[in-house]
Amino acid sequence: MPRLKRSNWVADFETTTDANDCRVWAWGLADVERARSSWDVEIGNDMASFIARIRKMPAIIYFHNLKFDGYFLLDYFYRVLKLTHVDRWPGANEFSTVIDHMGKFYMITVNWGNNKKTEFRDSYKKLPFKVSRIAEAFKLDEVKGSIDYHAHRPIGHQLTRNEREYLVADVLIVAQALKMEFDTGMTKLTVGADSLDDFKTLLSKEIFAKKFPVLPKNMDDEIRKAYRGGWTYADSRFQGVETRSGRTYDVNSLYPSVMYDRVLPYGTPVWRDGYPEPEEDYPLVILSITFTAKLKKDHVPCIQIKGSGQFLATEYQTNITEPVTISCTNVDLALWEDHYDMDIISYNGGWLFKGISGIFCEYIDKWMAIKSTSTGGMRELAKLHLNSLYGKFATNPDVTGKVPYFDDETDTVKLELGLTETRDPIYTAMGVFITAYARDMTIRAAQDNYATFAYADTDSLHLLTDEDPDNLWVDAQALGAWKFEYAFSRALFVGAKRYIEHKVNGDYECHVAGLPVEIGEALTIEDFVPGRRFEGKLNPRRVPGGIVLEDVGFTLPVW
């Protein structure tokens, strides 16, 4: 795409909550380079005045959650401006979009027909936190306020002082945080892309291209079958019953810690039929096996089977009686053989990789030093860089997205799947092995503390003990050590990403997948009743004009 010479801005819409009168009733806009106070935030009270303002300048404008604000833009483009959507760089009175297959908005680019173009981006992809969390983490002077979202605001509504302050704070918080990112050279579309670019620069892009060649699609597809996420597990011995007191530990930078010194793959792999035994020059393996397995006594389960009608994809299996075929790394296989009695019926071949350690050291040392010596914004940016790089290697090359269209029957903007689109993979095997080592580290730590282990989630352990375990490396700062987070007096663990703990300081720590934070913060163990329903979970609904958020409530799952 042609490059635009543009300034960076942050915008925010305030919108009505009435499905029969859905519109923008206020907007704020600020130049990232100059946003320091309320005087630097422009304010208006309808979409027409917003469009009239921005179409005068070539700009990149960030919304914090473009998926929400973007629907209001798209509705106006279709309904009022009569612009045409295209799947290329837009010409006069045209616009294009980058929306993934899940409906996540990354970018909207519009050509106003006056030699000016505007690119809308999602600042959440750069700063993956709520606005209130950004203000807190970056230690900004602005504090996110509150307003009555449901108050009646007629067309032409003049903002109250409180409404202006609320809008100004939202814009300034995001603008000032983005300014810090841009000042460190983070100018890509996402924080992951920023991190990968920084790593390539430190390593040199020439070396990167040699170490991590673009592999053929069929080879990448086979390697990707071994890619798995973190280990999240509630131990069945304590599941669904109130426990005694305990302690929670988190790894200091789990993924960077395994990236730092583990042997990791590089280069073009070689195929071996049957059992692909590691070789001196090719110590790492991704292989396919067909097997049955039974969990050993007093061991935590760690085999998850997806894409099979026999097994629930979210559960870890204890007894696999019918043969299954899985792709995995040699790191996974060694762990499974320690935890299960396995009968491997056949080795179905696999890829051998060359191995290297320390390739990420310079990158990690750089950002660990900034993290340890900084506060506020720079510390948060360092944490983002440390935690965002590994996943970028396994970016899916299938980038088929969704495209918007205006549905005349419902009078709303809708999305439909676009034409198949692919791009080169980066180096999936790197992501595969980093996540394998990370799982191995967490699972083995849980197993070492089997007597007290109650729950784990990727980089955390929840142990029913009142003292630091002897066989757990506990240190508040060391890379890869387990940091003591808090003690709890009692807890209830009911499943993966479903638990509540009563901290010794009196607060509650509640995590349930899909449960809004605001609801979770008010719950106690006594409230944690299966099937109990709470009001306050908002879901978006597309209506003429844009989106309204409807309270659909949340029901605690049955266990």
Image: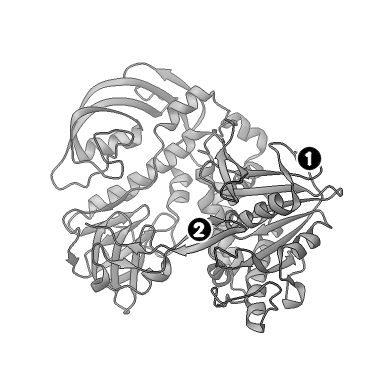
Which disc number belongs to residue 540?
A: 2
Question: Residue 34: x percent and y percent?
Answer: 77, 68
Question: Residue 39: x percent and y percent?
Answer: 76, 77
Look at the image and tell me in which quarter the N terminus lies. top right
Q: Is residue 356 visible?
A: no
Q: Residue 140 falls in which quadrant of the image? A: bottom right
Residue that badge 1 annotates? 2
Q: Amino acid at mark 2?
A: Pro
Q: Amino acid at mark 1?
A: Pro
Q: Residue at x 84, y 47 (%)?
A: 113
Question: Badge 1, how many Cα within 10 Å: few under 14, some, many 20+?
Answer: few
Look at the image and tell me in which quarter the C terminus lies. bottom left
Viewer-proximal residue among 45 and 363: 45
Question: Badge 2, how many Cα within 10 Å: few under 14, some, many 20+?
Answer: few
Question: Outermost residue, top direction?
Answer: 273
Viewer-proximal residue among 194 and 369: 194
Question: Residue 428: x percent and y percent?
Answer: 49, 34
Question: Residue 226: x percent and y percent?
Answer: 39, 33
Question: Outermost residue, right direction?
Answer: 114
Q: Residue at x 18, y 53 (%)?
A: 236
Which disc number belongs to residue 63?
A: none
30 is higher (above) or lower (below) than 353: below
Q: Mark 1 against mark 2, which lies toward the viewer?
A: 2
Between the residue at mark 1 and the residue at mark 2, the CA separation in whole angstroms equals 34 Å
